[in-house]
Image (cartoon, rainbow, N blue to C red):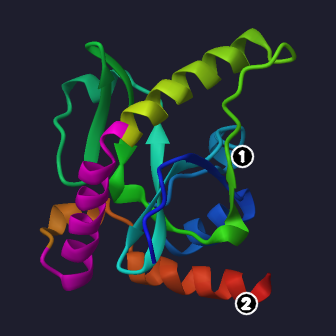
Amino acid sequence: MKQRRLNLYLIDMKYIRNLSKVDDNVMSVSPQIEKEKRPFVGIIIVCDMQEYCVPLSSPKHKHESMKNDVDFTKIIVEDKLLGVLNFNNMIPVDESCISPVDLKVTGKDSPQSRRYKKMAAKQLSWCQGHQDEITKKANKLYKMIESGKASGLLKRRCCDFAKLETVLQKWENSQ
C-alpha cells in the first residue's frame, strides 16, 4: 500500500464509537463528556500495509510544556503552537470511514468556521512539509507497540492497534 499525500480527514462517528468500546485510549466523541461536537480529524499514514489516522488536536496550555516524543509531536509555525499530532491515539481506517475535510473558505462560512479552516490549512501545510518524519514516527511507534518493545508507560498511553484492526475488519464486513 502506497503512502498518499497527507490531507485532513474526518472519521465517521459511529466507527469511532465502535473503536472506543474496545479501547479507552481512542479519543472520545461521547456526548456524556460533552465531546460529541468535537470531530475526529487527522492525517492518514500507512503502517505495515494498514492505513492509520493520526489525530490532530487543537493546542492546549498543557502542550506548551510537553516535549516531542515517539507518540507526540507539536505543530509549530513561526514560533506559535498551532496543534499537536497524537500518535498514541492513531486508529486504523479505510475508505468506508473517512471523508476529506474541505478547507476552502467560502462566503457562507461563519467567522468561527473561517478561523478553523485557516488554522487547519496551516496545520496541514506543516504536516505535508514534514510527511517523511511523520510517517517514520508513526511506523516506529506502531512497530514498538506490536512487537512488545514499548515501555509499560508508553504501552498504556497507546491504543491497542491489533484490537482496533479487528474492529475495522468487522466494520468493513458490515459496510
Task: Check residue 156 for magenta coloring.
Answer: no
In-front residue for pair 153/141: 141
For label 2, the SS is: helix
* Disc 2 residue crowd, few under 14, some 14–19, many 20+, Cα 10 Å: few
* N-term mark: 2 or 1: 1
Residue occupying the far top of the picture: 111
Q: Name the disc covering residue 165, or none.
A: none
- The location of residue 23, given as percent across then percent down, is 48, 70
Residue at image location 29% in from the left, 13% down from the top = 78
In-front residue for pair 136/91: 136
Q: Main secondary structure of the magenta part?
A: helix
Q: Amino acid at mark 2?
A: Asn
In the figure, residue 76 lies in which quadrant?
top left
Magenta stretch bounds = 129-149
Cα–Cα gap, marks 2 and 1: 27 Å
The answer to whether 25 is drawn above or below residue 121 in the figure is below
- The location of residue 141, given as percent across then percent down, is 24, 65
In-front residue for pair 116/163: 116
In-front residue for pair 72/157: 72
Residue at image location 29% in from the left, 34% down from the top = 74
- Residue 115 appears in the picture as rendered: yes
Q: Amino acid at mark 1?
A: Pro
- The location of residue 98, given as percent across then percent down, is 67, 60
For label 1, the SS is: helix
Q: Is residue 108 left or right of residue 61?
A: right
Kindly identify which residue carries mark 1.
Answer: 31
Quadrant (top left/top right/bottom left/bottom right) for the C terminus: bottom right
Task: Check residue 136 for magenta coloring.
Answer: yes
Kindly identify which residue carries mark 2.
Answer: 173
In the figure, residue 79 lies in which quadrant?
top left
Residue at image location 79% in from the left, 14% down from the top = 110
